Amino acid sequence: MFDSSNPPIEVSVRMLDGAVIRGHLSKGQSAGLEGVLSKDTPFLEFISKDGQRKFLSKHQIAYVEPVERLRVPALRPEIDPRVATARKILGLHDGCTFNDAKVAFHNKAKQYHPDNYSGIELPPEVEKYINEMFRQINTAFTELRAELNQAA
């Protein structure tokens, strides 16, 4: 289909009849979308989203827009693990009470509870991040509860 050394260009094509199709244009030896469109050929090689290979007549195309891929933000821990403490993980200050800790724990646990994301297909790194944050929150509350109970 496509040469892996020269990846295809994901595009949205509006035809003169108003139809919009999404898929990929083969770059061939061209440098980019401009090179593909400026080739001296009457047709463009197009692969639709369902994998069908088509040749589009350039004369029937109103315009072609490149579709930018979503950029996945790098997942990073919210707190530097070298200086992580139970209070920092839960977002608490040094003089907090048990009730403050309990409220903070419940809020964070609701945010990162894996059941919130059941039925949703997530990338493996996101699942790992959510599970790790939930584990850290539980561990932090357990440590803080023990510390506050000893102080009382």
Image (cartoon, helix red, strand yellow):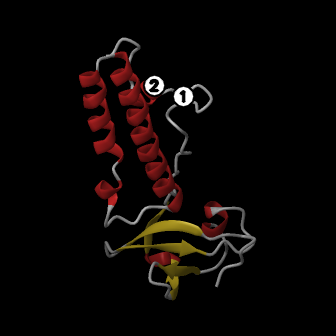
Image location of residue 2, percent across then percent down:
66, 80
Q: Secondary structure at mark 1?
A: loop
Q: Residue placed farthest to the top in the image?
A: 95
Quickly name the residue at label 2: 88
Q: Secondary structure at mark 2?
A: helix
Residue 2 - label? none
Q: Which residue is found at the position 44% from the left and 30% from the top? A: 89
| 58, above or below 80, in the image | below
Residue 84 - label? 1
The answer to whether 132 appears left or right of 93 in the picture is right
- Name the quadrant of the N terminus: bottom right
The answer to whether 73 appears left or right of 38 in the picture is left
User: Nearest the camera: 14 or 96?
Assistant: 96
Q: Are marks 2 and 1 in contact (CB under 8 Å)?
A: yes
Label 2: few (<14), some (14–19) or many (≥20) C-alpha neighbours in 10 Å: some
Q: Amino acid at mark 1?
A: Ala
How far apart are labels 2 and 1 at the CA level? 6 Å
Label 1: few (<14), some (14–19) or many (≥20) C-alpha neighbours in 10 Å: few
Image location of residue 123, percent across then percent down:
49, 61
Q: Which residue is found at the position 33% from the left and 75% from the top? A: 19
Q: Which residue is found at the position 31% from the left and 72% from the top? A: 18
Image location of residue 151, percent across then percent down:
37, 16
